Image (spheres, grey):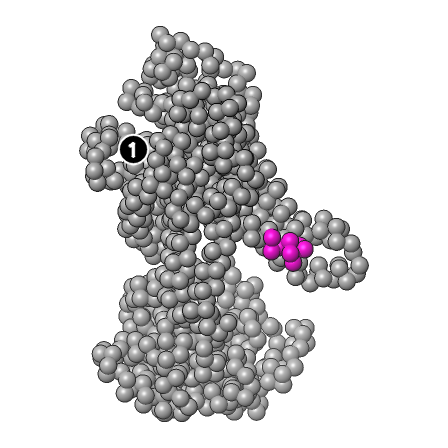
Amino acid sequence: MSKSKINKKLGFRLGFLIALFFLFFIGPFFLPHEPFETNISQAFLPPSSQHIFGTDNLGRCIFCRIIAGGKISVFTSLAVMTLSSVIGSILGIIAGYYGGIWDKIISDIITVFQAFPSFVLAIAIAGILGQSIKNAIIALCAVYWITYAKLSRSLVQQIRSDNYIKAAWLCGAPPTSIFFKYILPSIIGSLFITVVLDIGSVILSMAGLSFLGLGAVRPTAEWGAVISESRNFMQQAPWIIGFNGLALFLVVIGFNLFGEAMDEKINCK
Amino acid sequence: MLKQISKKVIHAAFLLLGITLVSFTLSYLSPGDPAQIQLSQSGMRVNPETLARMQTELGLDRPMLVQYLSWLKGILTGNMGFSYKSKKSVALLLSSALPNTLLLTIFSLLLMIIISTPIGVICAYKKEGIFDHIIRVLTYLFSSLPSFFISLVMLYIFALQLHWVPVLPSGLSGIILPALTMSLCLSAWYIRQIRSMILKEMEKKYVIGLTAKGFSDHTILFQHVLKNCMAPLITLFSMSFGSMLGGSAIIESIFVWNGVGKLAVDSISARDYPVIQGYVVWMAILFLLINFSVEILCQIIDPRIRREGLAK
Amino acid sequence: MNNILNVKNLNVCYGETAALKGIDFSLPQGQAVSFIGESGSGKTTLLSAIAGLLPKGSQISGDIEFIGQNFYALSEKKRRQILGNQIGIIFQNPELFLDPTEKIGKQMEDYIMLQHHIKRKDTHNKIYDILNQLSFPDVKSVLSAYPFELSGGMCQRISIAMVLSCENTKLILADEPTSALDQIIRSQTAKLLVDTQKKLQASLLLVTHDIKLAQDVSDYIGVMYKGKLIEWGTAEEIFISPYHDYTKALIAASPKKDTDFLHFRMYDATTDSKEFLRKEISPGHWVLI
C-alpha cells in the first residue's frame, strides 16, 4: 500500500478520535438536556426529535447521559493505560536491562500474576477494595501491567545484545545515556502501539467492571453501569442498552482502527 | 520426560504458593473489618467488646504471617473459611458451583471449536475471497463489543422476542444460550487467530516441497498444514480457557447460571470476602492445571518439542 | 532427437518488476543443462516458471512446451499431476522442504503411494531397494528419523531418492542442489544426481552458481544475467571458448564491473525494453548482443 494511502487512513482515524475527544470533553457543556435531572413523566420515551436516543426509566435523556458518561468511560481507561504501561514498562526495563536478581524477582512476580485469569483477578481486586472508580482503575492496572512488563523486558533483552549497544558500552558511555539515547527510542514505538491497540480492551473491561457494579457509582452515566441498571427494563426500553452499547462499540473501534493504522505506518517505513 | 514433568510440578507448586499469597494479601488489604461485617451480618450489636471478641474468634489479632499460614493450612485441608452471608463453608459453596461453571466452559469451548475452526480454515484457504472479507468484518465487529452487551442482545432476541428459550431456564437446557453467547464472543478472536496461523504455516517451504511432489492442495491442507498447527492451536485453547473462566462471571450473572462466576458476583455485592478469596484461589489453580496439562499435551503431539526436550 | 523442453520467449514479471525477459532455449531428451549466473540473475525464477511454482501474483507470458504440451495451457490439476510424476524437483535446503513433523519413512511412503497408486505396506520393498541403490549406510535409522535430525547432505540424498523412486520422471529440476552442503559432500551429491538422471534416462535442468558443478554435470550451459539469457552453448564450447566477456569473467571466477564489459551491451531485464539480437558463433552456440 502506498505511503500516501497509509497517511490518509491514519489521518482519518486520528480525526475520528479527536472528534470523539471533543464530543466527550467539550460536549457536556453544550447538551440540550440535563443528564442527571429526573422527570418521571418523561420516562421510557422511544427515540424522537425531542430526545434523539429516547429516555430512560427516570426520564433522563439518554443521548445526554451517553455524552456525559463518555468522559468517565474514556478517561478512566486512559488512566489505566497510562499507569499500567508506565509501571509495567519500568519494571520490565529494569528486569531486561540489569538482568540477574532483578530479572528473577520481577519475572517471578509476573509469572504469579499471570497464573490468574485476568478478569477474575480484576473482579477480585475491585470487589474486595470496594466499589469506586479508583479501585476499578487499580484493579485493571494490576491486570494490564503484565503485558507491558513482559513486552519491554523482551524488547530490552533483544536490543541489549545488539552490537551497537555493545559498541557504545565499550566506548565508555554511561549506562543512563545508553538507555535514553539508544534503548528507549527503539522500544517506545512498539510500546506505544501496544498501548493504543490495548485501549479498546481496557475500555471494555472497565465497562465490564462497572456492569458488575464494581466501578462507577450511581448516578454516574458510565456506559457499562447504565447497561447494567437498564437490564430490568430491557423489554420496555431496549434502546437504552442499544445506544450505550453502540457508544462503547464506536469508541473501541475508533481506537482499534487508529492503532492498526499506526501499526501499518510504522511497519511500512 | 519424567524429569521434565517433575520439574514442572515443582514450578507449579511455587506458583500456587505465590497465588495463595496474593489472594490472601488481597483480602488482608480489604477496607472492611471482617469482625465488624460478621457481627452486623449476624445482627449482633457492634461495640468495642463484641468487636474484640469477634476479632479474637476470627483470629484477626494474630500477625499477618501467622494468619496467612493458618489460612494456607486450612486450604490444604480443604477448609477455606466460612461465608459471611450464608455461614456455609466456602469450600462447599465453591465445590457445588464449580461443576456448573466447568460444564458451561467445556460446552462453550466445544461450541467455539465447532464454529470457528471450519470458518477459520475456509477463510485461510480462500484468502481474500468474499467469505473471508465478510467474516473478517464480522469478527472485527464482535470483538469490539463487550460480552455483557452481546449476552443481553442474545437474551433479548432469543428469550424475550422469539421465546425460543425461557428467560429463567431450569435444568440443563439453560446452558444453551450462555454457552452460545460465550462461544460467539470468543469465536471472533479465535477465527482470526486460526486464520493467521494457517496462513503462516502455508508460507513455510515444506508446502512448496509437497506441491512439487504432486500432492493436491486438499491433502496438503488437511494432512500437513492443519496437523502442524495442532500444537499451537491447543495452546490457543488454553489461553481462551482463561478468558472463559474470567468471562463466566458476567455471563453466569446475566443468564442466571449457578456457577462460581455468579457466586463471585453475588458475593461481591454482599461483601462476602471469604468467598471472593476462595474464588480467586480456585480459579487460579484451575487455570494452572489446565495450562499444565496443555503443555504436556503439546509435548506429546509435536515431535520437535519432544525431541528437543530430550536433547536438553 | 526430441526436445523434452522448448521454451519460447518466456517473460515473467512480479508486479511491475520484470524478472525474466525473452528466454529462449530447447533442452533435448536425456541431456543436462546448467543455468549459471550470479544471485538475482533470474535462474531460480526460470526454474520456478518451468515447474509451475511461481508465487501468486506473478505474470507469465510466452510458451513452455513440456514433452510437446503447452505446460501453462494445461489445467492446474493436470499440472499438479505432472509435478512429482514426470517432473522431479530438488531444492536447495532439502530439510526445509520436507514436513518437519513427519518421519522420513512416512514421507517417502506417502509419496510412493501417491505416484504408484499402491498401498502403504507395498511401498516398503521399493523404499529399501532405492535407499540401498543410493548406498545409505543405515536405512532403518534414516527412515525413522525426522528431517531436522538428518544432515543437509543426507536430506538431499533422500530428495534424490524420492525422485529416483518415480520411474516416470522425464525431467529433473534442481535448484542449487549442492550450495547448502559442505564442500566434501558436494561432488558426492553431484555424482548421485547424475547417476539418478542416467538411471531414469531423464533430462536435467540445473540452476547453480557453482561453476565446477555445472562443468561436471552438464551437456549444455545457459548463462543468465539480470533476467536475460545471454549465452547458450554446449558445455565444451562455453568452457573452452566462451564468447561473452561476462561468461569469461564468470568462469574465471573474477567478476568485473559492468563498465568493463565494453564490447557488449549489458541488458537489465528490469529496466530495458529494447529488442536484443542474437549472434551465432557456431551451430548451437550463440550470444546476445
Identity of the residue drawn at 34% across and 35% down: B88
Residue A151, image x, y percentages: 57, 50
Q: Tell me if residue A171 is in the magenta stretch.
A: no
Magenta stretch prevailing secondary structure: helix
* Chain of the residue under the numbered disc 1 shown in the image: B
Residue C155, image x, y percentages: 44, 80
Task: Write the start and end of the magenta stretch as one range.
Answer: A97-105
Foreground residue among B244 and A11:
B244
Foreground residue among A231 and C122:
A231
Residue at the right extreme of this rendering: A172
Q: Residues within 10 Å of mark 1 (few under 14, many from 20)?
A: some
Foreground residue among B181 and B247:
B247
Number of dots carrying numbers:
1
Tell me if I can see residue B209 in this picture. Answer: no
Q: Tell me if residue A101 is in the magenta stretch.
A: yes
Residue C178, image x, y percentages: 50, 82
Identity of the residue drawn at 68% across and 52% down: A183
State the residue position of label 1. B256
Identity of the residue drawn at 39% across and 58% down: B294
Instruction: Establish if C42 lies above or below A246.
Output: below
Q: Secondary structure at mark 1?
A: loop
Tell me if I can see residue C192 in this picture. Answer: yes
Identity of the residue drawn at 58% across and 42% down: A85
